[in-house]
Image (cartoon, grey):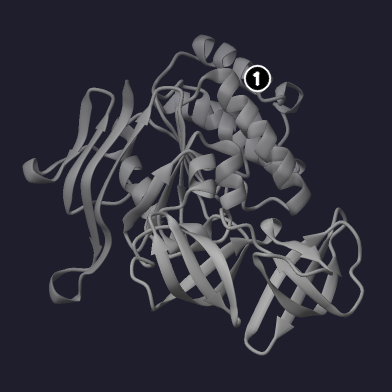
Amino acid sequence: MNVLTVNDLHLDYGHGATANPILKGVSMHLQRGEVVALLGPSGSGKTTLLRAVAGLESPKAGTIDIGERRVYDGSKKLELPAEARNLGLVFQSYALWPHKTVFDNVAYGLKLRKLAARDIEPKVREVLAQLGLGHLGERFPHQLSGGQQQRVAIARALVYNPPVILLDEPLSNLDAKLREEARAFLRELIVRLGLSALMVTHDQAEAMAISDRILLLNNGKIEQQGTPQSMYEAPDTLFTAEFMGSNNRLPARVVARSGGAARLQVEGMALNATARGSGASDPDVEASALIRVEEVRIGRTPVDNGIQLPLSTCMYLGDRWECLFKHGNSSVRAYSKHRVDPGQYWLEMPAEKLWVF
């Protein structure tokens, strides 16, 4: 069952001739117990879509349903305010009241809903315990770490058991190490409580780690959607392929194509590749060849499907080395378990992992 359905949503900033379209006919759904990540570059419309669902932005056309209840209908001029949509909201800035304790911050939404004090306390205590905050109820936000503040913001969103929780870049204020820990905590919490969540992020690793399904937005439209694994391993477009990983992009010429197999000319070498999308449909056309950095294999001896380039530099990343091979306008990055000595190397690119668009 869908707990959230968005159909053909359009939203502009400004009016008349100066109107700037932000959402250009976006349709999506969220099922009960599912986590969907809205992913995309700045300006793609992901935060605007989240805010439109929340009731914080006014669309121009389309419909939004929460469960069986219509909360926005452009054709009927129906638009329920944010407070009537009963959604849990977690903002990027956390937006905690600095003068209220953790307990009072979490209880605030229940007080607004005119719940009796005897009913508020057990609900707040329960959600604080679920998030490991039971011992921090009397503290103020400035006495908490960033990770604890984030959990208070999540507790406040969960306390009245909303049908959908909306998360706007929930981990972006945390430092790198804490982000990884919070990512695991958030995924575990969502699964344990059976939450339905819509999350905005610009971080593809975060989207893949936390979500069941990714909607990749590009310039106000959905470029591609699917499971994290399908988006990473089977991108339909060059935009999706480039956004979903760390890549090498090489100028190539399509020499021949048979079904999904393509023969390319790259750096004077003939390479076998896999054709994706429609960009590589015709022989003798300029195209973009792309391969994930982790799929390139470094060797000293000639290989059937590879190019030869000299090592330019090596960078130590802790668990591996990232090596840059460069000649003229061509450059390829690859990972190695060990430091690579200067010299010429063959960079093997398996045909099934070398995509041409």
> Foreground: 7 or 173?
7
Question: Is the C terminus in the top left, top right, bottom left or bottom right quadrant?
Answer: bottom left
Residue depicted at 46% across the width and 63% down the height: 262
Residue depicted at 48% across the width and 48% down the height: 234
> Where does residue 229 sit, x and y in percent of width and height?
54, 41
> Where does residue 354 sit, x and y in percent of width and height?
56, 61
Callout 1: SS? helix
Is residue 258 visible in the rendered structure shown here?
A: yes
Is residue 96 visible in the rendered structure shown here?
A: no
> Foreground: 283 or 30?
283
Seen as rendered, the residue at the extreme left is 76
Q: Residue 75's quadrant in the figure? A: top left
Residue depicted at 68% across the width and 32% down the height: 185
For label 1, the residue is 130
> Foreground: 119 or 200?
200
> Foreground: 161 or 136?
161
Q: Is residue 35 above or below residue 261?
A: above
